[in-house]
Every structure is written in structure tokens, then in C-alpha cells.
Image (spheres, rainbow, N blue to C red):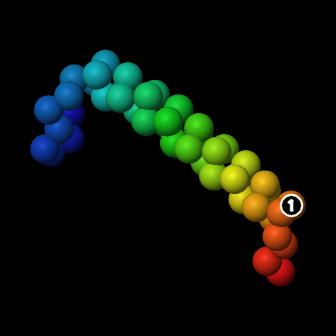
Amino acid sequence: MGPGSYLTPEEAKEFHKIFMTSFIIFTLVAVGAHVLVWMWRPWL
């Protein structure tokens, strides 16, 4: 267990799984929004 960590290794793995899933969903939504805006008004 690293310094300043109050999670057990199992809790840390669960947190990491949820964090990565949320990050991937956020990234996909952001990319999708950019594609839609690009189709509406290309900026380059």
C-alpha cells in the first residue's frame, strides 16, 4: 500500500475500474460531440 492511500488493494482495483470506465465514456461523448460540431461547422 502506497503512502497516503486509505484503500485496500481490492478497493483500489474497484475504484480504478470505475474511474477508467467513466473516463472512457466521457472521452467517447466528447469525441462524438466534436464530430457532430465538425459536421455542422468545420473549424479548419
Give coordinates of residue 14: x percent, y percent.
38, 22
Residue 31: where, in percent of width, then height? Answer: 70, 53
Most extreme residue toward the front is 40
**Count the marks: how many?**
1
Q: Nearer the viewer, residue 13 or 38?
A: 38
View extreme (bottom): residue: 44
The quadrant holding residue 41 is bottom right
Residue 44 vs residue 16, the one in the foreground: 44
Mark 1, residue position: 39
Rendering coords of residue 34 (x, y %):
72, 59
Nearest the eye: 32 or 2: 32
For this view, does 5 lie left or right of residue 9? Answer: left
Kindly indicate the quadrant of the structure image that contains residue 42: bottom right
Q: Residue at x 31, y 19 (%)?
A: 10
Instruction: Name the secondary structure under disc 1.
Output: helix
Which amino acid does the dot numbered 1 rest on?
Met
- On the picture, is 23 further left or further right than 3? right
> Which residue lies at the image location 44% right of the left edge and 28% below the top edge?
18
In the image, taking residue 36 as reference, residue 24 lies left or right, namely left
Asked if residue 15 is positioned above or below residue 25 in the image, the reply reads above
Q: Is residue 35 above or below residue 24?
A: below
Q: Where does residue 24 sit, x and y in percent of width and height? A: 58, 40
- Near-viewer residue (36 or 1): 36
Residue at x-position 46% and y-position 28%: 17
